Image (cartoon, helix red, strand yellow):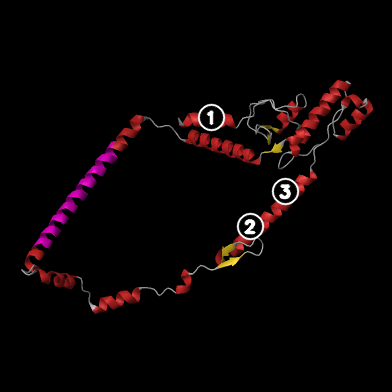
Amino acid sequence: MLFRRHCDLDDLLHCGICFDYFNIAMIIPQCSHNYCSLCIRKFLSYKTQCPTCFVAVTESELRNNRLLDDVVRTFVSARSRLSQSLSDDSPQSPSSKLPTRSTQGSSGNKSMDRFLVKSSTKRSKRSGDVANTSMEAAPEDHTSAPSSSMKSIKLEPGVLDQSLESVPNTPSTSLEKVKVECPVCGVGILEQYINKHLDSCLTRDEKKESLRSSIQKRKPMAKVVYNLLSERDLKKRLREAGLSTHGSKQQMIRRHQEFLHMYNAQCDSLHPKSGT
């Protein structure tokens, strides 16, 4: 059952176009279906609809699904670690395990028997002593029972003083947890953790700023109407992209289309690769 659920989860993390794990997952808001950025962009260049439910969609309507990317990354990493741990375990024959278990079990049983015998003898001795003392000390009148029990638990004054002196005097201020307000986010943090929180809080703001700047820097390239583009202009665009200008016009168009899809797919990534 567990293996079947694992397989079901593995299937859910595959793209419906390339049937591989999601790579820069993009979600269609109208139907919530997810695909790889490069896969869905290539598909939408031929048909502007969802490959699964055929709802109308354009490239500009695609949105990132960062959470799905994190799930895929975590799942693949956990699966590789699990397979590595299983391969590292050296197989042992059942015959080699049986003698060790039997010897350990027999030795454990013997030691347990000795322990039980000793404990039973101790309990019998204690019960006999208690019975003798109770029979000797029990008076006829029931009202004297509390006084005898109180006498049995009395401590000497010197021992009581030493026990009280051995207890450390803890200040009452140590039990109080003082919270201070973070000057950055305004959240109340324990005083002993405020420096650590400030470091993480400032680092978090820096990451947000760098994330915003990285998203603003990389913009997708606009679509090209190749039928209205001359061969000279097409070669110019290929040279700007660092691509080859050899071949027929149709070959150059397919080459530039492939580059355009890959470039725009990387624009969807959190850490886009260089276009060259």
Q: Amino acid at mark 2?
A: Ser
- Residue 12 placement, left or right of 184: left
Closer-to-camera residue (34/244): 34
Mark 1 sits on what residue?
A: 8
Label 1: how many Cα within 10 Å (few below 14, some 14–19, many 20+): few
Instruction: Name the residue: 86% across, 25% down.
Output: 252
Q: Kindly identify which residue carries mark 3.
A: 211
- Residue 237 appears left or right of 54: right
Q: Is residue 154 left or right of residue 263?
A: left
Label 2's element?
Answer: helix
Report the residue marked by disc 2: 200
Residue 120 highlighted magenta (yes or no): yes
Q: Nearer the viewer, residue 40 or 104?
A: 40
Mark positioned earlier in the residue sequence (1 or 2) = 1
Mark 1: secondary structure: helix
Q: How far apart are the alpha carbons under marks 1 and 3? A: 34 Å
Spatial separation of the CA atoms under disc 2 and disc 3: 16 Å
Mark 1 vs mark 2, foreground winner is 1
The numbered mark, 2 or 3, whose residue comes first in the sequence reads 2
Which region is colored magenta? 102-131
